[in-house]
Every structure is written in C-alpha cells, then in structure tokens.
Image (cartoon, rainbow, N blue to C red):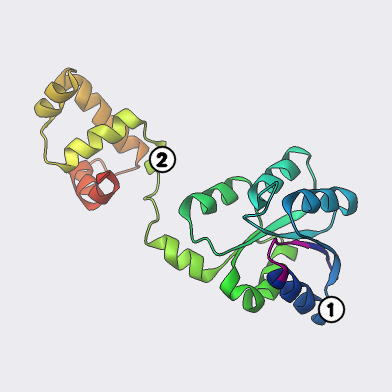
Amino acid sequence: MNPTIIIADDHPLVLKGLHDFLIEKEFNVLASAKNGKEALTLIKAHNPDIAILDIKMPFYTGLEIAEKCKKDQLSTKIVLITFEKDEKTYYDAKALGIYGYVLKEFALVEIENCISSVLKDTPYFSPELLKFLELHELPKHFESLTNHEKGIVKLISQNKTGVEIADLLAISPRTVEKHKSNIIKKLKLESKQNSLLIWAKENSNLFDS
C-alpha cells in the first residue's frame, strides 16, 4: 500500500528536501505546508494516512496539531521531525499517541524506516533520541509517587532515620513507616530490609534539584 502523506515544515529547504526525497521514493505526497495552520487545514481536508510535521512551526506546533487531531478523532498518524532531543517533548509525544519522532539530522536516513514502521502500526522513535533519553530515563513507577512521598524518599537517600524524617515533616514516626510501606508497594520493591534505602541511594540523582 502506498500511503497518502502530508508534510509540514517552516524551513523551505527542509520542506523541499523532504518532499523531493519522498517523491523520489515514490511515496504519495498529497501536499506540503509551511506552518501549523496550513498543516491542520490540509489534514482535515485530505485525512492522509500520515502527517510528517516539524515540531516548532508558526501558529501551531506539531504537538498542538497532534492534540487537535486526537480531539477530533482523526485517523491520520502523526510523525514529528525535530532537532529537539528533549525529554518533555518526547513524553508529551508519547502521551498523545504520536507514531513517530525523527531527529532532523537523520530524517532522510530514517524517514523510510519510520513510514514502514508506522504502516505496520508500530511507533518509530529515532534510535539516537532513545539513546540520548536512556541517560535520563526515569526509573519505573517513580511517577506514581506523590510529591510528599518523593520528599520522603529524598530524605531517606540522605540517610535520615524514620524518627528524623518524622521530626522534619512534623508527622509521627508511625506515619513515616506507613508512607514507607506505601512507597515500597508503589515502586514494586522486594519487601526485604533496606530495599527502599538501596533504591533511594541508587536514584539520589533524581532529587538533586
């Protein structure tokens, strides 16, 4: 199947390069847009299989377009191209169910793989990006902790005892123990002695700020 594609980028050279490359590879490029507003209009008009969008564009960013498409339940699969190796953008993209995230410096090398992956219903993220983000990957289940619980883990990582933590937070030592056992459950740690202390020490970099 030859998918229908719309592309959008506010850099004329990038847009032309991508357009010419896709045409040369015999992809069915319906149209190209120079900004987010044009891109959204084209997606609504043509309902293409895939929209390849720059993240930063005038009027709407690639992420904002993805959000609008999701809200309107459009079936177009969104692929973002960007220079940004940015954790927040990556997680925002994942949360919006975006199908591809390709770094611009590798766009021409990767876009074919990305399109064929997307057609198989498999999201594609630039290997370079994933390699970069691995260094910053949050440990599993960390986000399920409340801010209060994160504060307790931070104090544990600083070798504070239950009694000291109770004093600092003006709560009873019993409440601290209750919090600890909830945190252990949430982080799915083994219920052996010091498992939380070991985890807190290993991940103390999360609490540097």
Q: Is residue 72 visible?
A: yes
Residue 173 occupies which quadrant of the picture?
A: top left
Measured Cα–Cα span from mark 1 to mark 2:
44 Å
- The residue where tag 1 is placed is 26
Secondary structure of residue under mark 1: loop
Q: Is residue 83 above or below residue 110?
A: above
Q: Quadrant of the N terminus?
A: bottom right
Residue at coordinates 63% horizontally, 79% vertically from top-left?
109
Residue 125 occupies which quadrant of the picture?
A: bottom right
In this rendering, would 87 be left or right of 202? right
Amino acid type at image mark 2 = Glu
In this rendering, would 143 be left or right of 58? left
- The residue where tag 2 is placed is 143
Task: Answer whether labels 1 and 2 touch (C-beta < 8 Å).
Answer: no
In this rendering, would 147 be left or right of 52? left
- Give the crowd class for mark 2: few <14, some 14-19, many >=20 residues within 10 Å: few
Residue at coordinates 58% horizontally, 50% vertically from top-left?
94
Camera-near label (1 vs 2) is 1
Q: Is residue 97 visible?
A: no
In this rendering, would 78 be left or right of 195? right
Percent x, y for residue 202?
23, 52
Percent x, y for residue 81?
63, 63
Q: Give the extent of the magenta segment.
A: 7-12
Q: Earlier in the sequence, mark 1 or mark 2?
A: 1
Residue 10 occupies which quadrant of the picture?
A: bottom right
- Give the crowd class for mark 1: few <14, some 14-19, many >=20 residues within 10 Å: few
Between residue 175 and residue 10, name the one nearer to us: 10
Secondary structure of residue under mark 2: helix
Percent x, y for residue 140?
39, 48
